[in-house]
Amino acid sequence: MNPISVGLLGIGTVGGGTWNVLARNQEEITRRAGRGIRITKVADKDLARAQQLVGGSAAVTADAWEVVNDPAIDIVVELIGGCTVALDLVLKAIENGKHVVTANKALLATHGNEIFAAAQEKGVMVAFEAAVAGGIPIIKALREGLTANRIEWIAGIVNGTSNFILSEMRDKGLAFGTVLKEAQRLGYAEADPTFDIEGIDAAHKLTIMSAIAFGIPMQFDKAYTEGIASLAQEDIRYAEQLGYRIKLLGITRRTPEGIELRVHPTLIPARRLIANVEGVMNAILVKGDAVGATMYYGAGAGAEPTASAVVADLVDVTRMHTADPEHRVPHLAFQPDQLSDVAILPMDEVVTSYYLRMRVVDRPGVLADITRILADRGISIDAMVQKEPSEGEEQVDIIMLTHETREKHINAAIAAIENLAVVTGKVIRIRLEELGKH
């Protein structure tokens, strides 16, 4: 049987890794797929670099449209990123009856519904394992391995840049800005790190996982995102003293009122495995009703870890290339006509626990005023630490951990506490998840 013909859009970091992995493991991949998989055409703006990398083993062009319009190409691999030309190229490839493999989480999170509908109509596959958590096969686990389960929740560290920054802040006691510069120097953070440190990248990935877990359309615009740029060193230190670690966590949970979809810094008990994931590594916890909690850990980025997922998708598409479309695994695990319209829960309605830190004047009655404000809103305190003031200081930090309460209630309590004359500055609020009792 002739090899399946692949067109590669972009041969940068991940594209180069894909080329190398496919070439190095060609024999094993062919044995697994049942036929050869060969990249026959590569599109990249840097023609000289692309030609040097492929060494005459594939045609090279600077025009990506040549690839998607080539009738000899069976599968288009989109690795150029972004949501403008990438969307046009993917939709054109689908229109031309080609299967698509992509690592583009932003594209799927924002335009996935349109892309999957077009693919369904044309009877082609869109595979995207590499779009979430690099080399960790979390999409396959959610779509296939856990398909017997009613997924209850997912909690994941899915942005290596933010995790590296938080790990360094905790280990070395450094400020956020200092560690960010180091992350940029090491190549872990972009020159413009906004997507990583503001939680947007993690929210793209969480949107995709949530859609597959709960059988809902992609709804990135309803995801709550809060980044790590405002995290202070003292909060990381206080969390540690209380037995917690702070991680940028993506959380999606099924509740009777709707589906939570949120990314924010989160206190996690230090005894949890996921709290001990350090550096640029990723980890995802999935709770199913039958299997319980399962955890997936590994490299969330990088040339060959991500290429591992791209090539796995190529093998899957090759195996199912000739299968009837109705016999393939649905894009979002559920049959397209069985997707649910369950609403995404507004952040104000989310129920969780909280870490609060406030700077107060050290005088009698302050604590009573604060606890009364919390009690009036039905918020109970789980733990509290009042730090001793330094010599000569009249102000002191109070740290409280609350039991579970609704976000709108904690927001109202914080506003009332900040209005107290004895409270200086803003109350620092960080959400807390036990990840064990739900």
Image (spheres, rainbow, N blue to C red):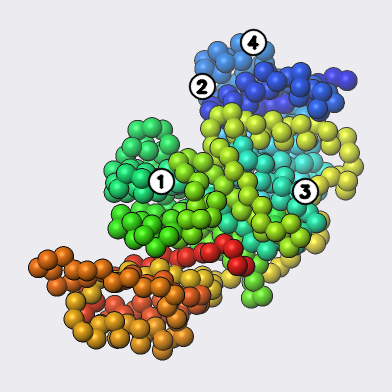
Looking at the picture, does residue 284 appear above or below residue 74? below
Q: Which residue is mark 3?
A: 144
Residue holding disc 2: 46
- The amino acid type found where label 1 is placed reads Ser
Q: Which residue is mark 1?
A: 167
**Residue 55 horizontal side relative to residue 319, left or right:** left
Give coordinates of residue 337: x percent, y percent.
81, 60
- Marks 2 and 3 sit apart, C-alpha to C-alpha, by 38 Å
Residue that numbered label 4 is attached to: 56
Q: Element at badge 3?
A: helix
Determine crowd level at label 4: few under 14, some 14-19, many 20+ residues with C-alpha closer than 10 A: few
Question: Depth-wise, is mark 1 or mark 2 nearer the camera?
Answer: 1
Circle nearer the N terminus (3, 4): 4
Please give the label number shown on residue 413.
Answer: none
**235 versus 52 height, above or below:** below
User: Mark 1 or 2 closer to N-term?
Assistant: 2
Crowding at mark 3 (Cα within 10 Å: few <14, some 14-19, many 20+) = few
